[in-house]
Image (spheres, coloured by chain):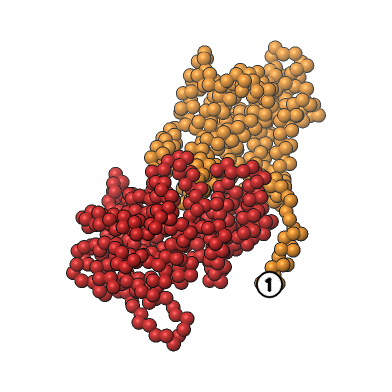
Chain colours: A orange, B red
Amino acid sequence: MAIAQPLDSAQELLTVEEESWGKIIWRRFRKHKMAIFGMVTLTLIFLFSYVGPLLRPYPESCRVIGQSKRDCVIDAVVNVYAPRSAEHPLGLDDVGRDTLTRLMYGGRISLFVGLSCAILSTIIGIVIGAVSGFYGRWVDAMSMRFVEFMLTLPTLPILLIIAAIRAKGGANFINVLIPTPIASAAGSILSMKPEEARDVLGLVLILVVFGWMGTALLVRGTVLSLRTLEYADAARALGASSWRIIRRHMIPNSLAPIIVSVTLAVGDFIIIESALSFLGFGVRVPTPTWGNMLTNTQAYMFVNPWLALYPGLLIFLTVLSINYIGDALRDALDPRLKE
Amino acid sequence: MTNSVQTNAPVQTQANQAAVAGDGQGTNEILLDVRNLRKYFPIRGGLLQKVVAQVKAVDDVSFTVRRGETLGLVGESGCGKTTTGRAILRLVEPTSGEVFFEGRDVLKARGKELKALRRDIQIVFQDPYASLDPRIPVGESIAEGLAIHGMGTPEERRQRVQEIIRKVGLHPNHVRRYPHEFSGGQRQRIGIARALVMQPKLIICDEPVSALDVSIQAQVLNLLKDLQREFGLTYLFIAHNLSVVEHISDRVGVMYLGKMVELADRDRLFSHPMHPYTKALMSAIPLPDPTVKRERIILQGDVPSPIRPPSGCRFHPRCWMAQEICAQLDPAFEEKEPGHWVACHFAQ
């Protein structure tokens, strides 16, 4: 003991950590090889979607009829399902549009919808779940009954009704909720007109409204057990407000399952979006998304299976990459794990 | 059951007033005054979650703590000593009773008042593993109280944390580390630092050494004593280990099944215990000298359930001195000798 003490402190002086929090996380993150793969892949997919279209000479939704050849390449009669060529590396689709270009534009919307839905619904889920679990009693009872109510709602029929109302045209009651600055901001990200972007945001809104309950239940369960730990009492004894305890102690400590759920949610939302697009809600053809490209090719699967493969592969790669990143992030953010 | 509590209450209050008057050579000498504190935990059941029973964790406990002293609180597991500590800090809301800290009514404090009180009263927890947030570097955990109360600039806080961490025997470099990188004893020192950094007047030590190795226990106890001397602290020291309590306390209160049964100066209590329960406890302390023979009092049976405590004196089913009256009348907590309070019909 007497000998160990000076050695110990000497060593401490040598290894004074001047590493920032970010650096520590990055060092741990790097250890996950698959996460690096995921980061690289995801970056490539983002570049593909947001920079790629600039390199292609075709607009994403060009139609065969009534557009100039320069925009739309395509000979509707002869070149539909044209095989891959130097000019069209992934061929043409059922109405003769350049598949590669449409994949790129579709990526913008799919990534945007997937990420924004996942993030927004997680934030809502965290807040409701944490408050519910922390306060308990009637707050918990009320919010959990509400969560159960939301879960019992048959989402798809409701969305169908909304889609039907929407299809009637006129004032879109959901889009009214979205303020113009946000719509035009989204429009510039997606390179869309604000009205079109508003449609996409309307979809995001609906998906978030129906998509936060899982996270809320997850966070509630975690917080329910965390709040009984002594460090919650310790914070309270120091005079911390409930909100501070939730923010500083409850949420950071329930991060691990949250990160896993948010990464899974991204993929889920991309796929739900495709189902809704198929039903005529949200993003409608000809505006491409990976989801609706996938859905639309169903009828032509046997003529040209590639058309289904491309968007499917991109969805798969995106979800996989995000999951790997999420895994690594969860480990990197947990100080308890060994270096 | 309810009857006995009601009949007993006025007697108890009188006894307490006597305590205040008796102790108070100057009333300002009393830092903490706990009167008739009760905490019943409801047990809910049935379809409508009606209250079907109550756990009487703390049932009519009164005592005072003088400035600068250490009041030990001993008792078996489940006797309500921890709940008493937590109720004083309002970590659990007491069912009834009064708590005064420097004349301020703790149980009626709201918002800012309560926050200010929590600056003056701090707590050190039993479990050094659960009482520190694993995701926050210990330096930040220690500084949290300062941040909550907006004390000092971030730079001043950092310096204060460095000072405090030295005081509790750790290295300033340790502030960046996470709780899992420390041993139990070190963590308990961090817990003490977290309480100490607020410059509190009273620290409630809730079994601070029970989870530690014996060798480490001594270190932490001595640290607490040193800090008390240096900062003029007052401790309410909760423990189940009599030797620990004897080592650190000036006065000692003994609790049994939610009641205070005896309260006296340490030396007095350990040399002349008056309550049969205290006597039994004392006889269980191991003696360092094997040649000394002592009559060992072995209690019969288990501690009864605090949901349905025995009638009259709660100790009577296990007491070898019990007579008829004990089952009928709850003995008042009275000052049988100056400064020596006992709740027993046959105290001697």
Counting from the top left corner in percent of width and height, residue A258 is at 56, 44
Counting from the top left corner in percent of width and height, residue B203 is at 49, 56
| In the depicted structure, whether residue B322 falls above or below residue B292 | above
Q: Image check: B7 left or right of A211?
A: left
> Which residue, as the protein is rendered here, is positioned at the far right?
A86
Q: In this rendering, does residue B347 appear at all?
A: yes
Counting from the top left corner in percent of width and height, residue A236 is at 49, 47
Question: Residue at the spot x=53%, y=18% of the render?
Answer: A176
Counting from the top left corner in percent of width and height, residue A17 is at 72, 53
Question: Residue at the spot x=39%, y=71% of the render?
Answer: B268
Pointer 1: residues within 10 angstroms few (<14), some, or many (20+)?
A: few
Where the C terminus of chain B falls, by quadrant? bottom left
| In the depicted structure, whether residue B196 falls above or below residue B115 | below
Res. B307 image quadrant: bottom left
Res. B114 image quadrant: top left
Q: Nearer the viewer, residue B325 or B63?
A: B63
